[in-house]
Image (cartoon, rainbow, N blue to C red):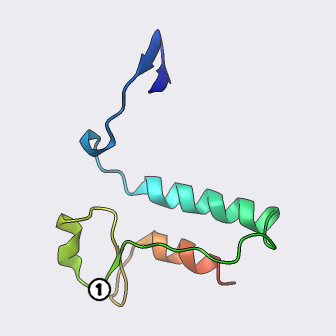
Amino acid sequence: MLPAPGGTRLIIWNEQPLDPRERQTALAALHEVYRENYRDLLSGILYWKLSTSETHASLEPYVLHVGTASKDRLQEILLRFAR
């Protein structure tokens, strides 16, 4: 349940419209906190939705395509953790 004007509302995530910016925003925020405050506490990050096949997007909409000429900004954000 999430707060909403006049009370709360139930969010069923798999019924919501797909917004790839959500994962970018979440990982960018995590990197910012890591960089500014917790560099010594976080020793790694695992993003498990990786694939080399673009056809996997029909099975998992938030998959990150690696090893291709992907223009997915998420890959750029994940690489920041290695620097």
Give residue 64's position: percent from left, percent from top.
37, 74
Labels in figure, total: 1
Is residue 37 rendered to the left or right of residue 49? right
* Residue depicted at 23% across the width and 68% down the height: 57
Q: Residues within 10 Å of mark 1 (few under 14, many from 20)?
A: few
Q: Is residue 68 above or below residue 7?
A: below
Element on which disc 1 rests: loop
The part of the image, by quadrant, that contains residue 43 is bottom right
Give residue 48's position: percent from left, percent from top.
42, 73
Is residue 17 rendered to the left or right of residue 81? left
Q: Residue furthest top?
A: 6
Q: Which of 16/40 is in front? A: 40
Q: Is residue 61 above or below residue 51?
A: above
Give residue 3's position: percent from left, percent from top.
50, 22
* Residue depicted at 53% across the width and 55% down the height: 25
The amino acid on which the numbered mark 1 sits, given as a three-letter code, is Thr
Q: Which of 24/11 is in front? A: 11
Q: Is residue 51 above or below residue 60?
A: below
Q: Image quadrant for the N terminus?
A: top left
Q: On the image, numbered disc 1 is attached to which residue?
A: 52
Is residue 78 rendered to the left or right of residue 39? left
Give residue 35's position: percent from left, percent from top.
76, 68
* Residue depicted at 29% across the width and 41% down the height: 16
Q: Which of 68/9 is in front? A: 9
Q: Is residue 33 above or below residue 65?
A: above
Q: Image quadrant for the C terminus?
A: bottom right
* Residue depicted at 48% across the width and 14% down the height: 5
